[in-house]
Amino acid sequence: MAAIAELSKETLATPKEERPYMIVMRRFVRHKLAVFGMIVIVLLVLLGLFASWIAPYPYDKQNLAPAYSNPSAAHWLGTDELGRDVLSRLLYAAQLSLFITFVVNIVSEVIGVVVGAISGYYGGWIDNTIQRFVEFMLTLPQLPLLLFFSAILRGITIPGLPDAWSNALIICFVLIVFGWMGATRLVRGMVLSLREQDFTQAAKALGMSDWQIIIRHMIPNSMAPVIVDFTLGLGGVIVLEAALSFLGLGINPPVPTWGNMLQNVQERMWQQPWLAFYPGICIFLVSLAFNYVGDAMRDALDPRLKR
Amino acid sequence: MTNYLIRRLVQMIVVVIVSSMAIYFLLWLAPGGPLDEINQGISDRKARFSEQDIQRVAEYLGLHRGPVWGFVAWIAGEDWMANVPQALWPRDRVTSEPVSLQRPICRDNPDKCGRGVLRLDFGISWQVARGSPVIKVIGDRLQNTLILMVAATVFSLLVAIPVGIYSAVHQYSRLDYAFTTFTFFGTAMPVFWFALLVIIAVSGNQSPWHQFLNLPYFPTGNVTTAKVLPGSIIDILNIKPSSLGDILVHAVLPTIVLSLLYMAGWGRFMRSSMLEVLRQDYVRTARAKGLIERVVIMKHALRNSLIPLVTIVVFQLPGIFGGAIITETVFNWKGMGFLYFQSLGTNDYPVAMALLFITSILVVVATLLGDFLYTMIDPRIRFS
């Protein structure tokens, strides 16, 4: 009797369907380097967010007496040419660098998703025009034009914002202008195949408008490659922004970013090599972390791979 | 075919003209132009700039023409502009009298008039090489950039193609993993930081790691040697300063730095392209009919996997001319990329305009060339 009760309980209990995001999570966790990368990123975001509490000194506090001092108890990572604490500057720099990369990538992906969905769904001359324009943008040499736009736009200040933030928003704008094409192509490709599938026909037959279909069916179903593109893009923009700042066309000192902290190190980098080392290793590690996370995302979200 | 070519050619010309027009007007609209500093000088009593001074400088640079006539002069020259009716002339900012569209130097001496881009005159440099013709400035730098870029491109391709093929054929092997790690490092590494580290490492007894590494001093900047340091690599190899060998030795470090960047990207590209081809039916057929693996890879797979690489190599063409802006700047390599960076920093508009114009021509030519090569390699693709 007891055995029968046990048996019926087992048969009656429907096997628990694993939720899709749990599958993704489980696959993601298997990529050890990506998990480590995730930890690095979360840590840096927290350090950046709470920089004003954690940092031992303000980022612009000058003290010329211990300029170029070696790492010590008072200044864990030493000081720079104006006697500013390098550790504090690194922490504050995380703020702006991470802010820029997240804003740029989120906005470019959103633009890419909308434009790509419209292009793929409507097809015809709309698709043709958009795709020719995307191809044109992709052939443009990126770095020279980025430098060109940063150089001519840096005089503009947005009223009501501190200089550094309006500076950052302009850099964001320039990077977005050259950053939305990848997502557009991805989403268009997805939508092209999605709109031929039966559920789209069904949705049409049920009387959904084009916009409803795009928002309810096309965009959610093409999210997987967009998420991967977003994560991989985060690392790329960090490096790009650092390059602009390094060349003096990004964020201007005294507000630190990892790029502009490398700007003036060339004079003293033999005596104080850590001045060149720390900001660079930050850029490198974050970018590497984003790349690994993106790589793991691609594997985790790929429906062709079984569990 | 002829029809297609003509259509493409017209499109190309339109694209180049429209883009250079856009760049010209953007430069004009941008805050902080060449007159900005002296404009600020007016309010500053000590600087003692008068409106007449500004008018004189504007005329000297040809800026008094305004953006529309300025663009016409840039593209078609100013020698014929004396014939423009006076009603269209710009006004003097002090006296409001009409002023000739020509620059003063052109009014006095017709030989010194600008001839415009269509007659291959890119004007005079304002700042970077003050007073010398832009075309000469570019000519001086072109050789350095070509040496660097050709070396880096060839070197990276020679490494990237075999490595990409190997790691595709032996997917998930140990070497494939090593290579994947390398590409991750290569894409994540900021090129300027890598350059700085390389410079620190090889700068002889200056280097903080001198005791451990003990490398001889290697030229870390500039294109030629000014003074031979005893014990440096130039001294050891006994190379004459400013000979070709000298330039080549100086090119080694920037080439390595630049190659790392290209290698990572292109190797990855080659790997995925090869993987794609290896999955095709004709590769299976080749294997099924009993060909040995080497022939399958080298003859059937390799040639097809190289097709997508054509686009990359073709689009390297504008890059080879334009140089590597960041690498050249860090290594103080006097090439086109460095020139472009300098011209932007100093508001040297004629130089920046010329470089962007030539780049835009090369981009459209590269696009056409890429399409052509595609149809030649892959007969399934046709012009339409």
Image (cartoon, grey):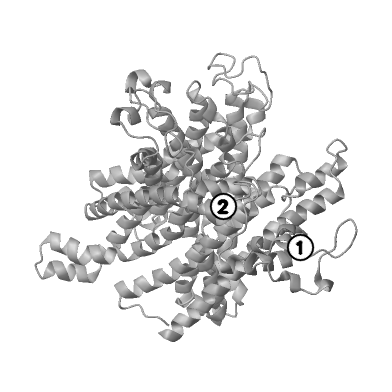
Give me the residue at 34% from left, 26% from top: B216
The relative height of residue B235 versus residue B141 in the rendered view (above or below) is above
| Disc 1 target residue | B66
> Is residue A188 or residue B6 the one in the foreground?
B6
Three-letter code for the amino acid on which mark 2 is drawn: Asn
Tell me if A299 is positioned left or right of B141 in this view.
left
Q: Position of residue B380 (x, y in %)?
A: 31, 78
Q: Is residue B321 above or below residue A160?
A: below
Query: For the residues marked 2 and 1, what is the alpha-carbon distance in whole angstroms?
Result: 38 Å
Q: Are marks 2 and 1 in contact (CB under 8 Å)?
A: no
* Secondary structure at numbered mark 1: helix
Residue, x 86% and y 50% (percent of image)? B51
| Residue at the limit of the structure toward the right, as seen here | B95
Question: What residue sits 23% from the left and 47% below the top?
Answer: B173
**Amino acid type of the residue that numbered disc 1 sits on in the rendered structure:** Gly
Depth check, front residue: B347 or A182: B347
The quadrant holding residue B292 is bottom left
- Please check whether the numbered discs 2 and 1 fall on a single chain: no
> Mark 1, residues whose alpha carbon is within 10 Å: few (<14), some, or many (≥20)?
few
